[in-house]
Every structure is written in C-alpha cells, then in structure tokens.
Image (tube, rainbow, N blue to C red):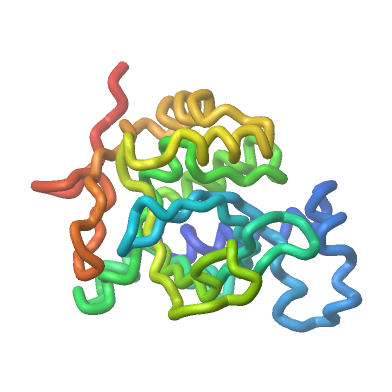
Amino acid sequence: MDRRDVLGVLGTLGVGLASAGQGQANHGDGKQGGDGPASSLHAHFCGIHIAKSNPRMQLIVQHYCAAHSDDLFQCILFDSAEKNARLLGVEYIISDQRYRKLPDTEKKYWHPHTYEVLSGGLIAPEMPADKEMAFMKHLLTTWGKTWHTWPDPQQSLPIGEPLLMWAVTGDGQLDDKVVAARDRQFKVSSEEIREKRVKEIGFEVPKVPLPKSTADVGRQWTGTGDDEPTPRRK
C-alpha cells in the first residue's frame, strides 16, 4: 500500500464526516470560514498523549484533521470537544514509507500509532463503526509528530516551551483513570474495541517500552530485534 492509499483515504474519510450528524453540527456548512484552511477540518479523532520527556504526564486530546497532500495529514489539537476548548498544539501524520526515509536526527520526533490503534486507545467517535475500522487500518502504520504549544492545560495561558509528545506503545504505560475518563466521555469500552480490532486487523497488540530519553527513535511493534508485527493468535 503506497502513500496515496494510506493518507489519501484518510482525507476521503475525513471529508465525508461533513454530512455525518455531529460532524456537521461542529463544522457547519463552511460558510463562516469560507474556503480557508479550517474549512476542511472534518476528521475528528481522540487519543491520549504523553510527554516524551515525562510519560507520567498524560492527557486526553481531540484531533481535528484534514489531508494536506497524499503523504501528509495535519491536525489541530484541543483539550476538549467544546467550543471554548484550549488549543493545545499540532500533529503531523505521515506514512511509514515516508518516515523510513527520514534521518534518525528527525525520526526522534515521530511516534508510532500501532499500539494506539490496536489497543483501542485511538477512537473516531463521530464515524460509523465500519468507517472507523477502515480509518484505523490506514492509521495503523503511520507516524505522528506532535508539539503541544500549551504544555500545561491547567494554566490559564500557554506558558512555557513547546512540549514534544509521544504515544503509548505498550500495556501498563497508561494511567487507568485517564483511560476510564475517556471511555466514559464517549461511552465506549477500550477493552471491547481492542478485542474487535485485533480480530479484524489480524495482529497482536505491540509491546514496545517507553523511550529512555527524548533522543530515542520510536519502534512500532517490538522493543528489540526485527520490528515486525506478531500475527493474531487464533
């Protein structure tokens, strides 16, 4: 599957949300924003970010995204889905093929999405179930570069330096209370989502340790050895 297949489909699915209930309510008919860049931000998905320099810092993040090109998806990040939400930062998403061409000095900024997808940590709450599954299949091997320019949402202003965020990459890394809060908010079960995705996608959930430093380069499937997926156990 090439870059156009991976990220082009993301854009198609995202734009399709403009006519899907909640998505339409959130974004209207696009007239207020005219034909500006914000008018195409229809794909909404929710994940849990952790700071690469401090994995104990964890927060639920709402992504509003659009395809910029066939190999780049870009998102604006908020701390909630409410109208007065804090704008936390930005995330750029590229295919695995594009990521592998980057030098290691750049790769250290990019986190994998494999665990988030297969574990149920990443959801698209406004998509129908079949479209969400297709969306997650295409996100599975992508990479994200995320900077939070509002590093501490508890502060009334975006004080401090931008914070490089990371993804959860293995079991036991997330605070159960954060997961429970996200599940309550969207009335979902991470455990049920995990079971369905592993069965549908056909791979076991990755087991990758958290980076020991901000200079570490991410891995998608395993902590050591060949970084290849493990087929689902029947």
Residue at image position (42%, 36%) is 119
Residue at image position (25%, 39%) is 207
Give the tally of numbered discs: 0
Q: Position of residue 222 (x, y in %)?
A: 20, 44
Dividing the picture into quadrants, the one containing residue 115 is top left
Residue extending farthest to the top is: 234
Residue at image position (32%, 65%) is 97
Q: Position of residue 64 (x, y in %)?
A: 65, 62
Please name whichever residue, 53 or 142, is drawn nearer the observer in this view of the structure: 53
Q: Position of residue 192 (x, y in %)?
A: 52, 24
Residue at image position (63%, 42%) is 131
Residue extending farthest to the left is: 225
Dividing the picture into quadrants, the one containing residue 107 is bottom left
Q: Is residue 130 left or right of residue 218?
A: right
User: With respect to residue 230, does 3 lie above or below?
Assistant: below
Please name whichever residue, 168 or 197, is drawn nearer the observer in this view of the structure: 168
User: With respect to residue 63, does 114 lie above or below?
Assistant: above
User: Can you see residue 154?
Assistant: yes
User: Can you see residue 70?
Assistant: no
Dividing the picture into quadrants, the one containing residue 163 is bottom left
Q: Is residue 223 left or right of residue 182?
A: left
User: With respect to residue 207, does 4 lie above or below?
Assistant: below
Please name whichever residue, 70 or 215, is drawn nearer the observer in this view of the structure: 215
Q: Position of residue 124 (x, y in %)?
A: 62, 46
Q: Quadrant of the C terminus?
A: top left
